[in-house]
Image (cartoon, rainbow, N blue to C red):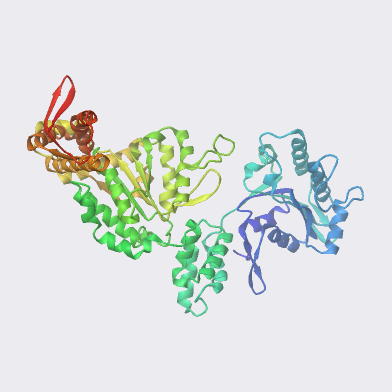
């Protein structure tokens, strides 16, 4: 800040001689730090605007508020009287809520016309909360259209004028403060050189660092800390509040002071402000203990994927330590962990995601799954972040943003991501980079405490697998190294050539986890696990102890592993058809099964239907 004022206020000062009306849009509801005799002073927009105008010789700033009515700055009797002489109409007091036989907008337009065309003194009008003047800028009623038509004409007929105390020709400007530039009719500002649109941005790093220095005095231990520790705190607070307003920074400082957060742990106050939860599961002492044995525990349930399990656990250990993206510097708002599971279908990608959830959060159900095949249409992005205002369901929010808002500490599973529309994948760029996403209502949702898991079947299709298996049933179709190269090339080709989204692949980095094919030995282990599930269900539901003869087991295993192209799902499907369905049919005919042992002695297929014999 060259003279201490934000850039947008300096641009307002420049516009006074060349533009009759100014539209301020964007971060207009924030607090702004302006220079003061003993440091910095927090000011709102109208106070900051008044200070700049006063330095340029403007006697007063009339503030028009749709709710509070008319006011004036500075708020003293002398100034109020001078302003009243400018905006007085029919000898009635102009202050207070607008009342006029032509309606409130007619009365307001009379006021701004009188100010803009006043002779002999510098005056300005700020129309606060101008976004709330009308319901829909695209559908104006006659009174609204007349108001903006008069405003449009006024912007073109007003001229800069000198005053007795200042020979410079300056406008008496009309300043509109809106959330979005589209909150005003397009025809008012489009192609109109007399109306300047000035964006009020979120505070940049230098401003946030200044604010951090100003706020830090209230933090526990700041005054006692050394100079280097103070600078480190200020830098960290500025870095961790990227994309936030100064109002948010002030709220974080109040929260840290109330929680007596040490200056070395200011990130805890930022995290608490973002997610609204004081407890941090990522720092729980039992989590480290679970992660030390996570690889062994998961491998006992996800069969044949030793390399994938170990790679995933390594990435999550990094997440637990808070080192994800550490090489990129101070941006700690990225997701805690990102994994991209790639490989054949039915090999345990979704199952591994569930097991990781169990290890991290102690609950295998603490994840939210999105089937990305449901998001193949471009408009389906509305399901993730919510429909735009004015559309059906806009007030319901998005499935993704609602899920993270309700459960900020969770695992998000995006299944078969290659089937999603490329436009939808663009949403993940902001999540992977900044760890946040703005929904359709304008609310920001933070992903900094989540783990993102993407799955994909890119690499080798079931048909290719079947052909390779048919050529040599006893040999795996590819070695581990060949599979790694093949799958990674397929993923790279899909993102760079098919989707034309190399930037998304770049965000994934080295977090691609390649899964093995299911071999014969692993298939037998999966088969035994699935049969054990049937045992457990029968025992729990009906008190029945199920047993298979060795011949029946071998027969079922041979059928289930005859074609491993569909992986574990193929084994489960065969087991359901050959055992579960005929077994259910036979048990349904019997009564008083509780406490009995049922042995399957024979399995046969006839007329396309499997049958079992029980003893």
Left or right: where 269 falls relative to 585: right
Left or right: where 324 falls relative to 113: left
Q: Is residue 510 visible?
A: no
Q: Is residue 416 above or below residue 56?
A: above
Residue 210 image offset from top left, x and y in percent:
56, 67
Looking at the image, which is closer to me, 158 or 506?
506
Q: Quadrant of residue 13?
A: bottom right
How many numbered marks, from 0 up? 0
Left or right: where 498 falls relative to 92: left
Q: Is residue 385 above or below residue 6?
A: above
Q: Residue at x 37, y 56 (%)?
A: 336
Q: Is residue 430 above or below residue 548?
A: below
Q: Is residue 178 visible?
A: yes
Looking at the image, which is closer to me, 357 or 555?
555
Residue 204 image offset from top left, x and y in percent:
54, 59
Residue 592 image offset from top left, x and y in percent:
23, 35
Q: Residue furthest top?
A: 607
């Amino acid at each position: 800040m060259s003279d201490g004022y934000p850039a947008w206020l300096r641009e307002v000062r420049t516009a006074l001689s060349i533009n009759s009306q100014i539209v301020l849009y964007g971060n207009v509801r924030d607090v702004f730090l302006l220079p003061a005799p003993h440091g910095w002073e927090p000011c709102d927009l109208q106070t900051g605007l008044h200070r700049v105008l006063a330095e340029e010789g403007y006697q007063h700033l009339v503030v028009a508020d749709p709710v509070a009515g008319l006011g004036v700055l500075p708020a003293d009797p002398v100034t109020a009287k001078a302003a009243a002489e400018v905006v007085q109409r029919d000898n009635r007091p102009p202050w207070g809520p607008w009342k006029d036989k032509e309606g409130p907008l007619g009365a307001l337009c009379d006021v701004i016309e009188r100010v803009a065309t006043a002779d002999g003194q510098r005056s300005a009008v700020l129309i606060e909360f101008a976004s709330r003047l009308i319901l829909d800028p695209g559908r104006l009623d006659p009174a609204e259209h007349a108001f903006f038509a008069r405003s449009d004409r006024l912007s073109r007929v007003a001229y800069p004028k000198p005053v007795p105390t200042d020979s410079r020709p300056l406008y008496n400007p009309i300043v509109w403060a809106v959330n979005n530039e589209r909150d005003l009719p397009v025809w008012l500002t489009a192609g109109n050189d007399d109306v300047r649109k000035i964006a009020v941005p979120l505070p940049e790093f230098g401003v946030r660092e200044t604010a951090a220095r100003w706020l830090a005095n209230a933090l526990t231990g700041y005054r006692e800390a050394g100079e280097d520790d103070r600078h480190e705190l200020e830098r960290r607070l500025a870095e961790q509040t990227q994309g936030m307003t100064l109002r948010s920074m002030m709220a974080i400082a109040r929260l840290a002071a109330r929680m007596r957060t040490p200056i070395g742990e200011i990130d805890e106050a930022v995290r608490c402000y973002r997610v609204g939860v004081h407890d941090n599961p990522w720092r729980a002492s039992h989590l480290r203990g679970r992660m030390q044995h996570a690889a062994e525990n998961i491998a006992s349930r996800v069969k044949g994927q030793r390399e994938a399990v170990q790679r995933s656990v390594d990435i999550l250990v990094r997440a637990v330590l808070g080192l994800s993206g550490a090489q990129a510097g101070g941006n700690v708002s990225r997701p805690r962990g990102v994994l991209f599971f790639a490989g054949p279908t039915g090999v345990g990608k979704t199952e591994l995601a569930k097991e990781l959830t169990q290890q991290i959060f102690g609950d295998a159900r603490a994840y939210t799954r999105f089937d990305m095949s449901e998001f193949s249409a471009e408009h389906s992005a509305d399901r993730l972040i919510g429909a735009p205002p004015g559309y059906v369901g806009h007030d319901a929010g998005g499935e993704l943003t609602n899920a993270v808002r309700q459960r900020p500490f969770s695992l998000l599973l995006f299944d078969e991501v290659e089937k999603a529309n490329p436009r939808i994948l663009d949403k993940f760029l902001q999540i992977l980079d900044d760890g946040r996403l703005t929904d359709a209502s304008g609310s920001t949702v933070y992903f900094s405490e989540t783990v993102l898991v993407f799955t994909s079947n890119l690499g080798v299709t079931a048909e290719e697998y079947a052909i390779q298996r048919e050529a040599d049933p006893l040999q795996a179709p590819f070695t581990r190294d060949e599979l790694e190269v093949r799958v990674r090339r397929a993923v790279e080709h899909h993102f760079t050539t098919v989707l034309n989204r190399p930037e998304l692949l770049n965000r994934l980095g080295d977090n691609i986890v390649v899964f093995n094919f299911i071999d014969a030995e692993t298939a037998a282990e999966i088969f035994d696990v699935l049969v054990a599930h049937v045992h457990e269900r029968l025992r729990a539901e009906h008190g029945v102890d199920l047993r298979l003869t060795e011949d029946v087991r071998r027969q079922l295993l041979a059928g289930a592993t005859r074609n491993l192209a569909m992986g574990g799902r193929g084994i489960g499907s065969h087991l359901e058809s050959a055992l579960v369905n005929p077994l259910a049919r036979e048990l349904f005919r019997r009564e008083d099964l509780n406490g009995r042992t049922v042995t399957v002695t024979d399995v046969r297929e006839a007329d396309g239907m499997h049958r079992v014999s029980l003893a």
